[in-house]
Image: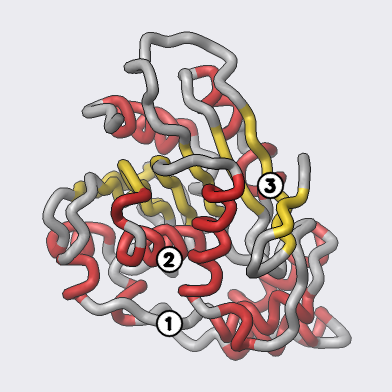
Amino acid sequence: MPIASLKSAQIFYLDQPATENTGLAPGDLPVLLVHGFSSSIADNWLNTNWVKFLNQNGWRVIALDNRGHGKSQKFYSQEDYSLPLMANDAIELLDHLEIPKSHIIGYSMGARIAAAMVLNNGDRTGRVILGGNGYGMIEGTGDWTPVHDGLLAKNPDEITDLRARAFRRFADRTGSDRRALAACVMGIRDRFSEGDFAAITNSVLIAIGEEDDIAGSGEKLAAIMQNARFFSIPGRDHMRASGDKAFKNEAAVFLREEPQL
Protein backbone atom coordinates (compact mmCIF):
# COMPACT_ATOMS: atom_id res chain seq x y z
CA MET A 1 0.00 0.00 0.00
CA PRO A 2 1.39 3.42 -0.98
CA ILE A 3 1.65 6.80 0.75
CA ALA A 4 0.04 9.85 -0.86
CA SER A 5 1.93 13.12 -0.44
CA LEU A 6 -1.08 15.39 -0.01
CA LYS A 7 -1.06 19.13 0.64
CA SER A 8 -2.25 18.47 4.18
CA ALA A 9 -0.34 15.35 5.23
CA GLN A 10 1.43 12.16 4.21
CA ILE A 11 -1.42 9.65 4.10
CA PHE A 12 -1.04 5.88 3.84
CA TYR A 13 -3.83 4.31 1.82
CA LEU A 14 -5.26 1.23 0.13
CA ASP A 15 -6.83 1.12 -3.33
CA GLN A 16 -8.24 -2.33 -3.99
CA PRO A 17 -10.21 -3.11 -7.18
CA ALA A 18 -13.26 -5.34 -7.15
CA THR A 19 -12.48 -9.04 -7.45
CA GLU A 20 -15.92 -10.17 -8.63
CA ASN A 21 -18.42 -9.00 -11.21
CA THR A 22 -21.68 -9.20 -9.30
CA GLY A 23 -23.94 -7.27 -11.61
CA LEU A 24 -23.51 -3.82 -10.10
CA ALA A 25 -24.46 -1.06 -12.48
CA PRO A 26 -21.51 -0.09 -14.70
CA GLY A 27 -19.69 2.86 -13.16
CA ASP A 28 -21.08 2.35 -9.66
CA LEU A 29 -19.14 4.39 -7.14
CA PRO A 30 -16.16 3.04 -5.23
CA VAL A 31 -16.43 2.79 -1.44
CA LEU A 32 -14.23 4.91 0.82
CA LEU A 33 -13.57 3.42 4.27
CA VAL A 34 -12.74 5.73 7.20
CA HIS A 35 -11.63 4.00 10.39
CA GLY A 36 -12.21 4.81 14.04
CA PHE A 37 -10.04 6.38 16.73
CA SER A 38 -6.81 4.49 17.53
CA SER A 39 -7.51 2.04 14.70
CA SER A 40 -6.13 1.75 11.14
CA ILE A 41 -6.83 0.23 7.73
CA ALA A 42 -5.48 -3.07 9.00
CA ASP A 43 -7.42 -3.20 12.27
CA ASN A 44 -10.73 -1.71 11.16
CA TRP A 45 -11.04 -2.98 7.59
CA LEU A 46 -8.56 -5.72 6.63
CA ASN A 47 -8.54 -7.85 9.78
CA THR A 48 -12.35 -7.71 9.90
CA ASN A 49 -12.61 -8.75 6.20
CA TRP A 50 -14.50 -5.62 5.16
CA VAL A 51 -12.21 -5.02 2.19
CA LYS A 52 -12.51 -8.62 1.03
CA PHE A 53 -16.29 -8.58 1.51
CA LEU A 54 -16.80 -5.39 -0.49
CA ASN A 55 -14.38 -6.46 -3.23
CA GLN A 56 -16.15 -9.79 -3.62
CA ASN A 57 -19.46 -7.97 -3.83
CA GLY A 58 -18.27 -5.85 -6.73
CA TRP A 59 -16.94 -2.62 -5.21
CA ARG A 60 -13.58 -0.96 -5.60
CA VAL A 61 -12.41 -0.07 -2.10
CA ILE A 62 -10.38 2.94 -0.98
CA ALA A 63 -9.23 3.21 2.64
CA LEU A 64 -6.84 5.50 4.49
CA ASP A 65 -4.97 5.57 7.75
CA ASN A 66 -6.21 8.81 9.29
CA ARG A 67 -3.53 11.32 10.25
CA GLY A 68 -1.92 10.32 13.54
CA HIS A 69 -2.85 6.68 12.97
CA GLY A 70 -1.27 3.61 11.42
CA LYS A 71 1.38 4.49 8.87
CA SER A 72 0.18 8.03 8.12
CA GLN A 73 1.93 11.20 9.27
CA LYS A 74 1.85 11.92 13.00
CA PHE A 75 1.07 15.31 14.53
CA TYR A 76 1.29 16.21 18.22
CA SER A 77 -0.91 19.29 18.57
CA GLN A 78 -4.66 19.13 19.17
CA GLU A 79 -5.15 21.80 16.50
CA ASP A 80 -3.92 19.33 13.87
CA TYR A 81 -6.87 16.98 14.49
CA SER A 82 -9.98 19.06 13.88
CA LEU A 83 -12.81 17.43 11.96
CA PRO A 84 -12.42 19.77 8.96
CA LEU A 85 -8.73 18.86 8.66
CA MET A 86 -9.33 15.12 8.91
CA ALA A 87 -12.23 15.25 6.46
CA ASN A 88 -10.07 17.28 4.07
CA ASP A 89 -7.40 14.55 4.15
CA ALA A 90 -9.96 12.10 2.78
CA ILE A 91 -11.15 14.53 0.10
CA GLU A 92 -7.55 15.21 -0.94
CA LEU A 93 -6.93 11.47 -1.19
CA LEU A 94 -9.91 11.12 -3.55
CA ASP A 95 -8.47 14.00 -5.58
CA HIS A 96 -5.08 12.26 -5.63
CA LEU A 97 -6.74 9.12 -6.99
CA GLU A 98 -8.86 11.15 -9.44
CA ILE A 99 -12.08 9.86 -7.90
CA PRO A 100 -14.80 12.52 -8.26
CA LYS A 101 -17.34 10.77 -6.05
CA SER A 102 -17.57 7.79 -3.69
CA HIS A 103 -19.80 6.05 -1.21
CA ILE A 104 -18.47 6.31 2.36
CA ILE A 105 -18.42 3.93 5.30
CA GLY A 106 -17.10 5.46 8.51
CA TYR A 107 -16.90 3.78 11.89
CA SER A 108 -16.89 5.63 15.24
CA MET A 109 -14.54 8.60 14.74
CA GLY A 110 -14.67 7.68 11.06
CA ALA A 111 -18.42 8.31 11.11
CA ARG A 112 -17.76 11.83 12.39
CA ILE A 113 -15.24 12.38 9.60
CA ALA A 114 -17.69 10.96 7.05
CA ALA A 115 -20.45 13.31 8.27
CA ALA A 116 -18.10 16.29 7.97
CA MET A 117 -17.21 15.21 4.43
CA VAL A 118 -20.87 15.06 3.43
CA LEU A 119 -21.67 18.46 4.94
CA ASN A 120 -18.78 20.22 3.25
CA ASN A 121 -18.48 18.18 0.04
CA GLY A 122 -21.93 16.76 -0.62
CA ASP A 123 -21.30 16.61 -4.36
CA ARG A 124 -18.39 14.21 -3.73
CA THR A 125 -20.35 11.66 -1.72
CA GLY A 126 -22.93 9.03 -2.66
CA ARG A 127 -24.47 6.76 -0.08
CA VAL A 128 -23.19 7.13 3.47
CA ILE A 129 -22.90 4.57 6.27
CA LEU A 130 -22.31 5.94 9.76
CA GLY A 131 -21.24 3.07 11.99
CA GLY A 132 -20.74 3.20 15.75
CA ASN A 133 -21.87 6.81 16.14
CA GLY A 134 -25.32 8.28 16.57
CA TYR A 135 -26.80 11.24 18.43
CA GLY A 136 -23.57 11.39 20.43
CA MET A 137 -22.17 13.38 17.51
CA ILE A 138 -24.58 16.15 18.55
CA GLU A 139 -24.84 15.88 22.33
CA GLY A 140 -21.33 14.58 22.98
CA THR A 141 -20.16 11.23 24.32
CA GLY A 142 -18.79 12.15 27.72
CA ASP A 143 -15.42 13.31 28.97
CA TRP A 144 -12.50 11.92 26.95
CA THR A 145 -9.82 13.51 29.17
CA PRO A 146 -9.28 10.18 31.01
CA VAL A 147 -8.56 8.54 27.62
CA HIS A 148 -6.04 11.29 26.84
CA ASP A 149 -4.39 10.83 30.23
CA GLY A 150 -4.48 7.04 29.96
CA LEU A 151 -2.72 7.11 26.60
CA LEU A 152 0.10 9.15 28.14
CA ALA A 153 0.30 7.26 31.43
CA LYS A 154 3.70 5.70 32.13
CA ASN A 155 2.14 2.75 33.94
CA PRO A 156 -1.02 1.38 32.26
CA ASP A 157 -1.80 -0.66 35.38
CA GLU A 158 -2.64 2.60 37.18
CA ILE A 159 -5.43 3.51 34.72
CA THR A 160 -8.77 3.17 36.54
CA ASP A 161 -11.19 4.58 33.94
CA LEU A 162 -12.65 1.65 31.97
CA ARG A 163 -12.85 3.48 28.64
CA ALA A 164 -9.31 4.80 29.05
CA ARG A 165 -8.04 1.34 29.93
CA ALA A 166 -9.68 -0.20 26.85
CA PHE A 167 -8.21 2.35 24.45
CA ARG A 168 -4.76 2.17 26.08
CA ARG A 169 -4.74 -1.61 25.74
CA PHE A 170 -5.80 -1.34 22.10
CA ALA A 171 -3.14 1.29 21.37
CA ASP A 172 -0.45 -0.84 22.99
CA ARG A 173 -1.58 -3.96 21.14
CA THR A 174 -1.42 -2.21 17.76
CA GLY A 175 1.85 -0.40 18.48
CA SER A 176 0.24 3.00 17.93
CA ASP A 177 1.89 6.36 18.56
CA ARG A 178 0.20 7.19 21.85
CA ARG A 179 1.27 10.86 21.89
CA ALA A 180 -0.36 11.40 18.50
CA LEU A 181 -3.52 9.62 19.64
CA ALA A 182 -3.66 11.70 22.83
CA ALA A 183 -3.62 14.88 20.74
CA CYS A 184 -6.21 13.46 18.35
CA VAL A 185 -8.70 12.38 21.01
CA MET A 186 -8.94 15.96 22.31
CA GLY A 187 -8.73 17.69 18.92
CA ILE A 188 -11.51 15.70 17.22
CA ARG A 189 -14.19 16.70 19.71
CA ASP A 190 -16.05 19.11 17.38
CA ARG A 191 -19.81 18.59 17.64
CA PHE A 192 -22.51 18.83 15.02
CA SER A 193 -25.90 20.49 15.35
CA GLU A 194 -29.27 18.95 14.55
CA GLY A 195 -29.44 21.42 11.69
CA ASP A 196 -26.24 20.01 10.22
CA PHE A 197 -27.69 16.53 9.96
CA ALA A 198 -31.09 17.80 8.83
CA ALA A 199 -29.32 19.44 5.87
CA ILE A 200 -27.88 16.14 4.61
CA THR A 201 -29.82 14.87 1.60
CA ASN A 202 -27.74 11.74 0.90
CA SER A 203 -29.13 8.31 1.64
CA VAL A 204 -27.70 7.37 5.05
CA LEU A 205 -27.54 4.13 7.03
CA ILE A 206 -26.77 4.45 10.74
CA ALA A 207 -25.53 1.16 12.21
CA ILE A 208 -24.80 0.81 15.93
CA GLY A 209 -24.31 -2.21 18.16
CA GLU A 210 -27.32 -2.84 20.37
CA GLU A 211 -24.98 -2.95 23.40
CA ASP A 212 -22.98 0.15 22.39
CA ASP A 213 -22.77 2.59 25.33
CA ILE A 214 -20.64 5.19 23.51
CA ALA A 215 -22.40 6.06 20.24
CA GLY A 216 -25.64 7.62 21.43
CA SER A 217 -29.03 6.94 19.85
CA GLY A 218 -29.05 5.87 16.23
CA GLU A 219 -32.83 6.12 16.03
CA LYS A 220 -32.79 9.72 17.26
CA LEU A 221 -30.16 10.73 14.72
CA ALA A 222 -31.95 9.00 11.85
CA ALA A 223 -35.19 10.80 12.74
CA ILE A 224 -33.53 14.18 12.17
CA MET A 225 -32.29 13.35 8.70
CA GLN A 226 -34.15 13.54 5.41
CA ASN A 227 -33.29 10.10 4.05
CA ALA A 228 -31.82 7.92 6.80
CA ARG A 229 -32.59 4.66 8.53
CA PHE A 230 -31.19 2.88 11.56
CA PHE A 231 -29.86 -0.66 11.85
CA SER A 232 -29.18 -2.22 15.26
CA ILE A 233 -26.21 -4.61 15.10
CA PRO A 234 -27.38 -7.58 17.20
CA GLY A 235 -25.46 -8.49 20.34
CA ARG A 236 -22.53 -6.15 19.76
CA ASP A 237 -20.93 -3.39 21.81
CA HIS A 238 -18.86 -0.53 20.41
CA MET A 239 -15.60 -2.44 20.16
CA ARG A 240 -17.06 -5.62 18.64
CA ALA A 241 -19.55 -4.22 16.14
CA SER A 242 -17.26 -2.97 13.40
CA GLY A 243 -16.58 -6.37 11.79
CA ASP A 244 -19.97 -7.94 12.42
CA LYS A 245 -21.38 -10.12 9.60
CA ALA A 246 -24.91 -8.72 9.94
CA PHE A 247 -23.50 -5.20 9.65
CA LYS A 248 -21.65 -6.11 6.44
CA ASN A 249 -24.72 -7.72 4.91
CA GLU A 250 -26.92 -4.73 5.76
CA ALA A 251 -24.29 -2.41 4.27
CA ALA A 252 -24.27 -4.36 0.99
CA VAL A 253 -28.07 -4.23 0.76
CA PHE A 254 -28.01 -0.49 1.44
CA LEU A 255 -25.28 0.27 -1.09
CA ARG A 256 -27.12 -1.71 -3.79
CA GLU A 257 -30.55 -0.14 -3.32
CA GLU A 258 -30.15 2.73 -5.75
CA PRO A 259 -26.68 2.79 -7.32
CA GLN A 260 -25.59 6.40 -7.71
CA LEU A 261 -23.66 6.96 -10.91
Circle 3 crowding by C-alpha within 10 Å: few under 14, some 14–19, many from 20: many
3D distance between C-alphas at marks 3 and 1: 25 Å
Mark positioned earlier in the residue sequence (2 or 3): 3
Q: Is residue 258 left or right of residue 21?
A: left
Q: Residue at x 17, y 74 (%)?
A: 195
Q: Residue at x 60, y 87 (%)?
A: 79
Give amino acid for label 2.
Arg
The quadrant of the picture occupied by the N terminus is top right
Q: For residue 170, say whether it is visible.
A: no
Point out residue 172 in the picture as x, y percentages from the top left corner: 82, 66
Front-most of residues 261 and 139: 261
| Residue 260, picture quadrant | top left
Up-down relation of residue 97 to residue 38 (above or below): above
Up-down relation of residue 132 to residue 233 (above or below): below
Give amino acid for label 3.
Tyr
Residue named by callout 2: 112
Point out residue 42 in the picture as x, y percentages from the top left corner: 71, 45
Mark positioned earlier in the residue sequence (2 or 1): 2
In the rendering, which numbered label is found on residue 190? 1
Is the residue under label 1 in contact with that under label 2 (CB below 8 Å)?
yes
The quadrant of the picture occupied by the C terminus is top left
Residue named by callout 3: 13
Q: How many marks?
A: 3
Mark positioned earlier in the residue sequence (3 or 1): 3
